[in-house]
Amino acid sequence: MKLTTTPKGSRGRVSDPASEQEYAQALLRLLDANLSLYDDMNRWPKSEPGSLLFEDDQATYPFPISNDVRYLLLVAADNLNGLRSMILEATENGQPRLNLHVFAPYTLIRNAIECASTALWIMTPAERHERVLRLAQFELEDAKKNKAALTAFGGSGEETFNRKKGIIEGIIRRYAELSWKGVDDGFRITGLLRTIGSLPGLEGLNPLGKWQIASGMAHGKRWVGTLLSDLKEDAQPTTKGDSTFLLYGSFERVFWLAQCAQTLLYEASNQVIEKSQETTGDQAQGNNVEDPR
């Protein structure tokens, strides 16, 4: 399948067929490894009492950090599993063959990058109060979206929102370092991705840029068409001032972005495993506080 259109644009390239086969095999290996990770996630034990994650959960009760983080990671992994199912198409003789859509894979990859990055962003601060703050920002954003969705369907989410907001305020009051303004300043996915891209060891990954490209493809943005055009260098404009861009399904591009999602997924998963086992002598603030609900 190919798409042809005529925006003002740039010149691109056509991927080499042999190279595309190599990227297709590399992508399948990546997605097969993700299947194993997904199975492992479903068998993860609960955090051990005394571990960092266990005490984080106590500090953020009744919204334990581990619940949100594991949920985000399962969503990210499931999106990559969906990509694998999309690419592997069964035939009548039972032998799978490769099938690649032009745009559809990028919706799944975008979601995987976003969810894995959010989980990693919540988990990475060294100080507990910073992890609590990020969890509170994420939960408040979720409450706002829930309220907006209920309103859009003719309901009222005001009572539910106020109840959840009150619980989050109770969690924040446990920490002298935190203020409600820090929570209400908002959850920004672009800022989050920029922060993740600056972490040691991830400086060259550029999750923000790759998320933007995946988003552009998912939402049909023309700037991505010109950026990723498969047009040959010697192609001529079809009309004065315009040039044609061609978009083919590309295993190279899909692998490039899926590899970013999987790297983030593994980094976040490692954080969960380490913090589930690592013990600390500190006690989480708020262990004996009254239930804010």
Image (tube, rainbow, N blue to C red):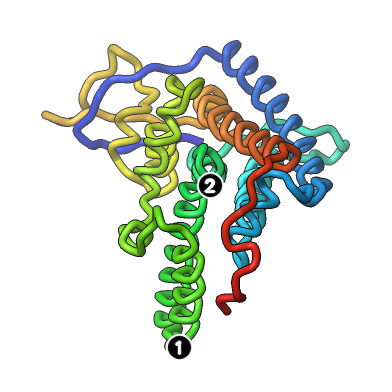
Residue 35 quadrant: top right
Is 20 rendered above or below residue 169? above
Find residue 254 and report its horizontal and vertical position in percent. Answer: 54, 30
Please report whichever mark, 2 or 1, sits nearer to the chain's N-terminal start. Answer: 2
Residue 293 badge: none
Instruction: Report the residue marked by disc 2.
Output: 128
Instruction: Report the residue marked by disc 1.
Output: 155
Residue 203 quadrant: top left
**What crowding class fits label 1: few (fewer than 14 Cα within 10 Å), some (14-19), or many (20 or more)?**
few
For the residues carrying marks 2 and 1, which lies nearer the camera in this image? 2
Element class at badge 2: helix
Q: Does any portion of residue 108 appear in the rendered image?
A: no
Of residue 37 and residue 111, the one placed in the foreground of this image is 37
Q: Where, quadrant-wise, is the C terminus in this rendering?
A: bottom right
Find residue 278 and report its horizontal and vertical position in percent. Answer: 72, 37
Q: Residue furthest left?
A: 240
**What crowding class fits label 2: few (fewer than 14 Cα within 10 Å), some (14-19), or many (20 or more)?**
some
